Image (cartoon, rainbow, N blue to C red):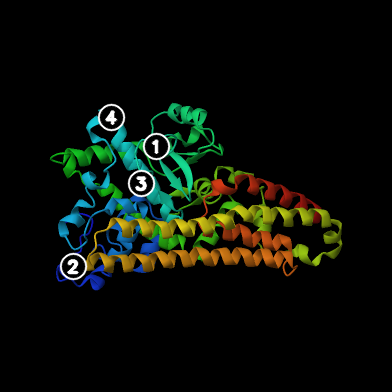
Amino acid sequence: MMKGIKNEQFWNLWRQKNYEEALSCSVAPTVVSQEQRVRNLLFGGKKQIQQTVAISTISVGEFFYDFIMLDPLAVEGIDFAREEDLSHLFSLSEFAKTVDTTSLTGDMAQLQGYVAERMIGSELQARGHDVEFPATSNQAGYDLLVDGEPFQVKNLINPQGVREHLERYPDIPVYVNEELGKYFEGNPQVYVTSISHEEVINTTKQTLSHAADLTDFEIPYITFIIYTASNVKRVWRNDLTIEQAVINILVDSSAKIAFASLGKMTGTALGVALFGPQYGILSAGIGAILFGSQSRYASDFIKKALASKEEKELKDSVFYLSEPILKKVDEKIEIRHDKLRKLKEGLEKSHTNEIMLQKLTAMKDEDIQYIAYKKKELEKTLSDIQNGRIYVLDGYKEIMKTIPKTGVHPHNYQSELDFANAAFIKLREKVL
Protein backbone atom coordinates (compact mmCIF):
# COMPACT_ATOMS: atom_id res chain seq x y z
CA MET A 1 0.00 0.00 0.00
CA MET A 2 1.21 3.50 -0.77
CA LYS A 3 2.64 5.20 2.30
CA GLY A 4 1.27 8.60 1.31
CA ILE A 5 -2.44 7.75 1.79
CA LYS A 6 -3.34 5.76 4.88
CA ASN A 7 -7.12 5.75 4.66
CA GLU A 8 -8.34 2.24 3.79
CA GLN A 9 -11.71 3.66 2.78
CA PHE A 10 -10.00 5.55 -0.04
CA TRP A 11 -8.33 2.40 -1.34
CA ASN A 12 -11.55 0.37 -1.20
CA LEU A 13 -13.43 3.01 -3.18
CA TRP A 14 -10.53 3.42 -5.62
CA ARG A 15 -10.36 -0.31 -6.33
CA GLN A 16 -14.12 -0.28 -6.88
CA LYS A 17 -13.54 2.49 -9.46
CA ASN A 18 -15.66 4.90 -7.42
CA TYR A 19 -13.09 7.62 -8.09
CA GLU A 20 -15.12 10.74 -7.36
CA GLU A 21 -16.09 9.56 -3.89
CA ALA A 22 -12.58 8.25 -3.23
CA LEU A 23 -11.05 11.65 -3.94
CA SER A 24 -13.34 13.18 -1.30
CA CYS A 25 -12.02 10.84 1.41
CA SER A 26 -9.60 12.24 3.96
CA VAL A 27 -5.96 11.28 3.55
CA ALA A 28 -5.95 9.82 7.07
CA PRO A 29 -8.98 8.16 8.67
CA THR A 30 -8.91 9.96 12.05
CA VAL A 31 -10.04 13.57 12.32
CA VAL A 32 -10.01 16.37 14.86
CA SER A 33 -12.33 19.34 15.14
CA GLN A 34 -11.76 22.26 12.79
CA GLU A 35 -11.35 24.58 15.77
CA GLN A 36 -8.65 22.45 17.39
CA ARG A 37 -6.82 21.88 14.11
CA VAL A 38 -6.61 25.60 13.33
CA ARG A 39 -5.56 26.36 16.92
CA ASN A 40 -2.72 23.86 16.68
CA LEU A 41 -1.60 25.17 13.32
CA LEU A 42 -1.57 28.76 14.49
CA PHE A 43 -0.26 28.42 18.00
CA GLY A 44 1.11 24.89 18.39
CA GLY A 45 4.68 23.77 18.55
CA LYS A 46 6.17 21.39 16.01
CA LYS A 47 4.95 18.31 17.88
CA GLN A 48 1.36 19.56 17.97
CA ILE A 49 1.51 20.54 14.31
CA GLN A 50 2.81 17.10 13.34
CA GLN A 51 0.03 15.43 15.31
CA THR A 52 -2.55 17.70 13.75
CA VAL A 53 -1.26 17.06 10.26
CA ALA A 54 -1.21 13.32 10.80
CA ILE A 55 -4.93 13.30 11.56
CA SER A 56 -5.95 16.13 9.27
CA THR A 57 -9.13 16.27 7.28
CA ILE A 58 -7.33 17.08 4.04
CA SER A 59 -9.00 15.15 1.26
CA VAL A 60 -7.12 12.91 -1.11
CA GLY A 61 -8.12 15.25 -3.94
CA GLU A 62 -6.59 18.24 -2.15
CA PHE A 63 -3.49 16.24 -1.33
CA PHE A 64 -3.00 15.19 -4.96
CA TYR A 65 -3.57 18.76 -6.13
CA ASP A 66 -0.91 20.26 -3.87
CA PHE A 67 1.49 17.41 -4.56
CA ILE A 68 1.09 17.39 -8.32
CA MET A 69 0.88 21.15 -8.86
CA LEU A 70 4.27 21.48 -7.19
CA ASP A 71 5.73 19.50 -10.09
CA PRO A 72 3.27 18.34 -12.79
CA LEU A 73 6.01 16.46 -14.64
CA ALA A 74 6.36 14.10 -11.67
CA VAL A 75 3.31 12.16 -12.88
CA GLU A 76 4.28 12.04 -16.53
CA GLY A 77 3.29 8.76 -18.16
CA ILE A 78 1.32 7.30 -15.24
CA ASP A 79 -2.24 6.05 -15.08
CA PHE A 80 -3.99 6.73 -11.79
CA ALA A 81 -6.04 3.57 -12.29
CA ARG A 82 -2.93 1.48 -11.61
CA GLU A 83 -2.22 1.17 -7.91
CA GLU A 84 1.46 0.58 -8.56
CA ASP A 85 1.64 3.92 -10.37
CA LEU A 86 0.20 5.65 -7.33
CA SER A 87 2.78 3.97 -5.12
CA HIS A 88 5.68 4.85 -7.41
CA LEU A 89 4.56 8.45 -7.41
CA PHE A 90 6.14 8.83 -3.97
CA SER A 91 9.34 6.91 -4.60
CA LEU A 92 12.61 8.64 -5.37
CA SER A 93 13.01 6.64 -8.59
CA GLU A 94 9.87 8.28 -9.99
CA PHE A 95 9.79 11.55 -8.10
CA ALA A 96 13.38 12.52 -8.83
CA LYS A 97 13.94 11.33 -12.37
CA THR A 98 16.36 14.17 -13.11
CA VAL A 99 18.54 13.58 -10.06
CA ASP A 100 21.79 11.66 -10.65
CA THR A 101 21.71 9.49 -7.54
CA THR A 102 24.79 7.52 -8.64
CA SER A 103 27.02 10.45 -7.63
CA LEU A 104 25.58 10.64 -4.12
CA THR A 105 28.37 11.61 -1.74
CA GLY A 106 28.91 10.63 1.87
CA ASP A 107 27.15 13.69 3.20
CA MET A 108 24.30 13.23 0.70
CA ALA A 109 24.88 16.71 -0.70
CA GLN A 110 22.92 16.16 -3.88
CA LEU A 111 20.03 14.27 -2.38
CA GLN A 112 19.54 16.53 0.64
CA GLY A 113 19.67 19.52 -1.70
CA TYR A 114 16.91 17.99 -3.78
CA VAL A 115 14.79 17.27 -0.70
CA ALA A 116 15.33 20.82 0.60
CA GLU A 117 14.19 22.26 -2.73
CA ARG A 118 10.93 20.28 -2.56
CA MET A 119 10.37 21.23 1.07
CA ILE A 120 10.90 24.93 0.40
CA GLY A 121 8.78 24.71 -2.75
CA SER A 122 5.92 23.24 -0.72
CA GLU A 123 6.27 25.94 1.92
CA LEU A 124 6.11 28.66 -0.73
CA GLN A 125 3.18 27.04 -2.52
CA ALA A 126 1.27 26.96 0.77
CA ARG A 127 1.65 30.75 1.00
CA GLY A 128 0.10 31.26 -2.42
CA HIS A 129 3.23 31.38 -4.55
CA ASP A 130 3.53 29.49 -7.82
CA VAL A 131 6.55 27.22 -7.83
CA GLU A 132 8.16 25.58 -10.86
CA PHE A 133 11.27 23.45 -11.18
CA PRO A 134 13.71 23.55 -14.11
CA ALA A 135 13.71 20.61 -16.50
CA THR A 136 17.17 19.49 -15.31
CA SER A 137 18.70 19.41 -11.84
CA ASN A 138 21.87 21.22 -12.92
CA GLN A 139 20.29 24.45 -14.15
CA ALA A 140 22.92 27.17 -13.77
CA GLY A 141 22.14 29.86 -11.21
CA TYR A 142 18.78 28.74 -9.89
CA ASP A 143 16.89 25.76 -8.50
CA LEU A 144 13.28 26.89 -8.80
CA LEU A 145 11.02 29.59 -10.20
CA VAL A 146 8.78 31.42 -7.74
CA ASP A 147 5.97 33.34 -9.44
CA GLY A 148 8.04 33.08 -12.60
CA GLU A 149 11.25 34.49 -11.05
CA PRO A 150 14.43 32.41 -10.52
CA PHE A 151 15.59 31.54 -6.98
CA GLN A 152 18.53 29.53 -5.71
CA VAL A 153 18.19 27.15 -2.73
CA LYS A 154 21.05 26.59 -0.29
CA ASN A 155 20.82 24.13 2.58
CA LEU A 156 24.26 24.44 4.14
CA ILE A 157 26.20 24.39 7.40
CA ASN A 158 28.16 27.60 6.77
CA PRO A 159 27.35 30.75 4.74
CA GLN A 160 30.26 30.59 2.31
CA GLY A 161 28.27 28.83 -0.41
CA VAL A 162 25.58 31.50 -0.24
CA ARG A 163 28.14 34.29 -0.52
CA GLU A 164 29.71 32.60 -3.54
CA HIS A 165 26.30 32.35 -5.22
CA LEU A 166 25.57 36.04 -4.59
CA GLU A 167 28.94 37.02 -6.05
CA ARG A 168 28.40 34.92 -9.15
CA TYR A 169 24.68 35.60 -9.59
CA PRO A 170 23.95 38.91 -7.83
CA ASP A 171 20.53 39.23 -9.47
CA ILE A 172 19.23 35.81 -8.40
CA PRO A 173 17.91 35.76 -4.80
CA VAL A 174 18.46 32.73 -2.61
CA TYR A 175 16.51 30.78 -0.01
CA VAL A 176 18.60 29.48 2.89
CA ASN A 177 18.00 27.17 5.84
CA GLU A 178 17.20 28.76 9.18
CA GLU A 179 20.69 28.29 10.62
CA LEU A 180 22.14 30.70 8.04
CA GLY A 181 19.63 33.48 8.68
CA LYS A 182 21.82 35.32 11.19
CA TYR A 183 24.51 35.88 8.55
CA PHE A 184 22.23 37.66 6.08
CA GLU A 185 19.78 39.65 8.18
CA GLY A 186 18.24 42.45 6.10
CA ASN A 187 19.94 41.33 2.87
CA PRO A 188 17.30 41.89 0.16
CA GLN A 189 18.62 38.94 -1.86
CA VAL A 190 18.44 36.36 0.93
CA TYR A 191 15.24 34.75 2.21
CA VAL A 192 15.36 32.58 5.31
CA THR A 193 13.05 29.60 5.65
CA SER A 194 11.94 27.67 8.72
CA ILE A 195 13.66 24.56 7.35
CA SER A 196 16.62 23.26 9.34
CA HIS A 197 19.73 21.82 7.68
CA GLU A 198 20.12 19.24 10.44
CA GLU A 199 16.49 18.20 10.14
CA VAL A 200 16.82 17.57 6.40
CA ILE A 201 20.02 15.57 6.80
CA ASN A 202 18.78 13.45 9.71
CA THR A 203 15.44 12.66 8.09
CA THR A 204 17.07 11.69 4.81
CA LYS A 205 19.65 9.48 6.53
CA GLN A 206 17.02 7.71 8.63
CA THR A 207 14.85 7.05 5.61
CA LEU A 208 17.73 5.79 3.50
CA SER A 209 18.83 3.40 6.23
CA HIS A 210 15.46 1.64 6.03
CA ALA A 211 15.47 1.31 2.24
CA ALA A 212 16.67 -1.86 0.55
CA ASP A 213 18.13 0.27 -2.19
CA LEU A 214 17.76 3.79 -3.49
CA THR A 215 14.84 2.96 -5.76
CA ASP A 216 12.89 1.89 -2.67
CA PHE A 217 13.53 5.23 -0.99
CA GLU A 218 10.17 6.74 -0.12
CA ILE A 219 10.11 10.40 0.82
CA PRO A 220 7.77 10.55 3.80
CA TYR A 221 9.11 13.93 4.84
CA ILE A 222 8.12 15.48 1.53
CA THR A 223 4.66 13.93 1.77
CA PHE A 224 4.45 15.26 5.33
CA ILE A 225 5.35 18.70 4.01
CA ILE A 226 2.51 18.43 1.48
CA TYR A 227 0.10 17.51 4.29
CA THR A 228 1.28 20.53 6.24
CA ALA A 229 1.17 22.80 3.21
CA SER A 230 -2.42 21.83 2.49
CA ASN A 231 -3.39 22.80 6.02
CA VAL A 232 -1.38 26.00 5.99
CA LYS A 233 -2.96 27.01 2.70
CA ARG A 234 -6.38 26.86 4.34
CA VAL A 235 -5.20 29.12 7.12
CA TRP A 236 -3.47 31.45 4.65
CA ARG A 237 -6.70 31.76 2.67
CA ASN A 238 -8.49 32.90 5.83
CA ASP A 239 -8.49 36.63 5.14
CA LEU A 240 -9.07 37.57 8.78
CA THR A 241 -6.12 35.46 9.90
CA ILE A 242 -3.64 36.85 7.38
CA GLU A 243 -4.91 40.38 7.94
CA GLN A 244 -4.33 40.03 11.67
CA ALA A 245 -0.84 38.71 10.95
CA VAL A 246 -0.09 41.79 8.83
CA ILE A 247 -1.37 44.07 11.57
CA ASN A 248 0.67 42.31 14.21
CA ILE A 249 4.00 42.49 12.43
CA LEU A 250 3.51 46.14 11.52
CA VAL A 251 2.44 47.11 15.01
CA ASP A 252 5.17 45.12 16.77
CA SER A 253 7.66 43.25 14.65
CA SER A 254 9.31 41.82 17.75
CA ALA A 255 6.13 40.04 18.82
CA LYS A 256 6.21 36.28 18.42
CA ILE A 257 3.57 35.15 15.98
CA ALA A 258 2.93 31.45 15.64
CA PHE A 259 1.97 30.89 12.02
CA ALA A 260 2.21 27.32 10.82
CA SER A 261 4.59 27.24 7.94
CA LEU A 262 6.49 24.08 8.82
CA GLY A 263 6.69 25.27 12.41
CA LYS A 264 6.59 28.46 14.42
CA MET A 265 7.48 31.77 12.81
CA THR A 266 8.54 34.77 14.85
CA GLY A 267 7.26 38.21 13.96
CA THR A 268 10.46 38.81 12.00
CA ALA A 269 10.17 35.57 10.02
CA LEU A 270 6.55 36.25 9.16
CA GLY A 271 7.39 39.83 8.23
CA VAL A 272 9.95 38.56 5.74
CA ALA A 273 7.44 36.04 4.36
CA LEU A 274 4.84 38.77 3.87
CA PHE A 275 6.94 41.72 2.73
CA GLY A 276 10.45 40.39 2.05
CA PRO A 277 13.81 40.91 3.81
CA GLN A 278 13.30 44.68 3.64
CA TYR A 279 10.03 44.62 5.55
CA GLY A 280 11.95 46.44 8.30
CA ILE A 281 11.82 49.58 6.15
CA LEU A 282 8.21 49.89 7.22
CA SER A 283 8.60 52.69 9.71
CA ALA A 284 8.18 52.29 13.45
CA GLY A 285 4.61 52.94 14.42
CA ILE A 286 3.17 52.38 10.94
CA GLY A 287 0.84 49.75 12.28
CA ALA A 288 -0.45 51.88 15.12
CA ILE A 289 -1.31 54.61 12.63
CA LEU A 290 -2.56 52.55 9.71
CA PHE A 291 -4.54 49.94 11.56
CA GLY A 292 -6.44 52.04 14.02
CA SER A 293 -9.94 53.35 13.41
CA GLN A 294 -10.86 55.32 10.30
CA SER A 295 -8.06 57.80 9.67
CA ARG A 296 -8.36 60.86 11.85
CA TYR A 297 -6.40 62.80 9.27
CA ALA A 298 -9.29 62.74 6.83
CA SER A 299 -11.27 65.26 8.90
CA ASP A 300 -8.39 67.68 9.42
CA PHE A 301 -8.86 69.87 6.36
CA ILE A 302 -6.21 72.41 7.31
CA LYS A 303 -3.49 69.83 7.70
CA LYS A 304 -4.59 68.09 4.53
CA ALA A 305 -4.38 71.34 2.59
CA LEU A 306 -0.87 71.97 3.91
CA ALA A 307 0.15 68.44 2.95
CA SER A 308 -1.24 68.40 -0.59
CA LYS A 309 2.22 67.81 -2.11
CA GLU A 310 2.97 64.90 0.22
CA GLU A 311 -0.50 63.48 -0.34
CA LYS A 312 0.08 63.46 -4.10
CA GLU A 313 3.45 61.78 -3.63
CA LEU A 314 1.90 59.00 -1.58
CA LYS A 315 -0.88 58.58 -4.15
CA ASP A 316 1.70 58.25 -6.91
CA SER A 317 3.81 55.82 -4.88
CA VAL A 318 0.79 53.66 -4.10
CA PHE A 319 0.12 53.19 -7.81
CA TYR A 320 3.83 52.63 -8.40
CA LEU A 321 3.82 49.91 -5.71
CA SER A 322 0.69 48.23 -7.04
CA GLU A 323 1.76 48.09 -10.70
CA PRO A 324 4.19 45.12 -10.49
CA ILE A 325 1.80 43.27 -8.18
CA LEU A 326 -1.16 43.57 -10.54
CA LYS A 327 1.01 42.48 -13.46
CA LYS A 328 2.38 39.51 -11.54
CA VAL A 329 -1.11 38.27 -10.60
CA ASP A 330 -1.89 37.90 -14.32
CA GLU A 331 1.38 36.00 -14.78
CA LYS A 332 0.56 33.73 -11.83
CA ILE A 333 -2.79 32.87 -13.36
CA GLU A 334 -1.10 31.92 -16.61
CA ILE A 335 1.45 29.78 -14.72
CA ARG A 336 -1.39 27.78 -13.16
CA HIS A 337 -3.07 27.28 -16.53
CA ASP A 338 0.27 26.17 -17.96
CA LYS A 339 0.80 23.62 -15.19
CA LEU A 340 -2.53 21.98 -16.01
CA ARG A 341 -1.61 21.95 -19.70
CA LYS A 342 1.66 20.18 -18.89
CA LEU A 343 -0.17 17.70 -16.70
CA LYS A 344 -2.70 16.87 -19.43
CA GLU A 345 0.05 16.39 -21.98
CA GLY A 346 2.02 14.08 -19.68
CA LEU A 347 -0.75 11.76 -18.49
CA GLU A 348 -1.83 8.68 -20.35
CA LYS A 349 -5.34 8.76 -21.75
CA SER A 350 -7.71 6.85 -19.48
CA HIS A 351 -11.08 7.25 -17.79
CA THR A 352 -9.43 7.47 -14.37
CA ASN A 353 -6.99 10.13 -15.48
CA GLU A 354 -9.83 12.14 -16.98
CA ILE A 355 -11.66 12.13 -13.65
CA MET A 356 -8.48 13.16 -11.87
CA LEU A 357 -7.93 15.98 -14.34
CA GLN A 358 -11.47 17.24 -13.83
CA LYS A 359 -10.89 17.34 -10.07
CA LEU A 360 -7.54 19.09 -10.35
CA THR A 361 -8.90 21.57 -12.91
CA ALA A 362 -11.74 22.53 -10.57
CA MET A 363 -9.26 23.16 -7.75
CA LYS A 364 -7.01 25.15 -10.07
CA ASP A 365 -9.97 27.30 -11.12
CA GLU A 366 -10.80 27.90 -7.46
CA ASP A 367 -7.22 29.02 -6.80
CA ILE A 368 -7.32 31.36 -9.77
CA GLN A 369 -10.67 32.78 -8.70
CA TYR A 370 -9.23 33.64 -5.28
CA ILE A 371 -6.20 35.59 -6.50
CA ALA A 372 -8.25 37.24 -9.26
CA TYR A 373 -10.63 38.50 -6.58
CA LYS A 374 -7.70 39.87 -4.57
CA LYS A 375 -6.53 41.68 -7.67
CA LYS A 376 -9.98 43.27 -7.99
CA GLU A 377 -9.84 44.31 -4.33
CA LEU A 378 -6.53 46.04 -4.96
CA GLU A 379 -7.84 47.72 -8.12
CA LYS A 380 -10.94 48.98 -6.29
CA THR A 381 -8.84 50.52 -3.52
CA LEU A 382 -6.67 52.26 -6.11
CA SER A 383 -9.79 53.57 -7.84
CA ASP A 384 -11.19 54.84 -4.53
CA ILE A 385 -7.93 56.67 -3.81
CA GLN A 386 -7.79 58.14 -7.30
CA ASN A 387 -11.40 59.38 -7.17
CA GLY A 388 -11.14 60.72 -3.63
CA ARG A 389 -13.65 58.28 -2.16
CA ILE A 390 -11.15 57.40 0.54
CA TYR A 391 -8.24 59.37 1.95
CA VAL A 392 -4.89 58.12 0.72
CA LEU A 393 -3.70 57.06 4.20
CA ASP A 394 -6.77 54.87 4.58
CA GLY A 395 -6.19 53.53 1.08
CA TYR A 396 -2.58 52.74 1.93
CA LYS A 397 -3.80 50.79 4.94
CA GLU A 398 -6.07 48.64 2.75
CA ILE A 399 -3.36 48.10 0.16
CA MET A 400 -0.86 46.94 2.78
CA LYS A 401 -3.39 44.37 3.99
CA THR A 402 -4.29 43.17 0.48
CA ILE A 403 -0.81 42.76 -0.99
CA PRO A 404 0.12 39.57 0.94
CA LYS A 405 -3.20 37.97 -0.01
CA THR A 406 -2.36 38.16 -3.72
CA GLY A 407 0.41 35.60 -3.23
CA VAL A 408 2.87 37.74 -5.21
CA HIS A 409 6.39 37.13 -3.96
CA PRO A 410 7.77 40.24 -2.19
CA HIS A 411 10.96 40.14 -4.27
CA ASN A 412 8.86 41.63 -7.07
CA TYR A 413 8.15 44.90 -5.26
CA GLN A 414 10.93 45.60 -2.74
CA SER A 415 12.11 48.90 -4.26
CA GLU A 416 8.52 50.04 -4.84
CA LEU A 417 7.67 49.29 -1.21
CA ASP A 418 10.67 51.33 -0.07
CA PHE A 419 9.52 54.25 -2.23
CA ALA A 420 5.94 54.08 -0.94
CA ASN A 421 7.05 53.89 2.66
CA ALA A 422 9.22 57.00 2.24
CA ALA A 423 6.21 58.86 0.85
CA PHE A 424 4.07 57.61 3.72
CA ILE A 425 6.56 58.92 6.28
CA LYS A 426 6.58 62.38 4.68
CA LEU A 427 2.79 62.64 4.73
CA ARG A 428 2.56 61.26 8.25
CA GLU A 429 5.00 63.88 9.52
CA LYS A 430 3.02 66.67 7.85
CA VAL A 431 -0.41 65.71 9.18
CA LEU A 432 0.56 64.70 12.70
Circle 1: element type? loop
Circle 3: element type? helix
- Location of mark 1 (residue): 139
Looking at the rendered image, the disc whose residue lies closer to the viewer, 4 or 2, is: 2
- Location of mark 4 (residue): 107
Q: Along the line of sight, which residue is nearer the eye, 395 or 431?
A: 395
- Location of mark 3 (residue): 119
Q: Badge 3 local density, few (<14 within 10 Å), some, or many (20+)?
A: many
Circle 1: residue type? Gln
- Location of mark 2 (residue): 14
Q: Which part of the image, by quadrant, shows the N terminus?
A: bottom left
Q: Which part of the image, by quadrant, shows the C terminus?
A: bottom right
Which circle's residue, 1 or 3, is located before the other in the chain?
3
Would you say the residues marked 2 and 3 are in contact, meaning their CB atoms lie under 8 Å apart? no
Q: Where is residue 62 in the image (x, y as percent from the top left)?
A: 33, 63
Which circle's residue, 2 or 3, is located before the other in the chain?
2
Circle 4: residue type? Asp
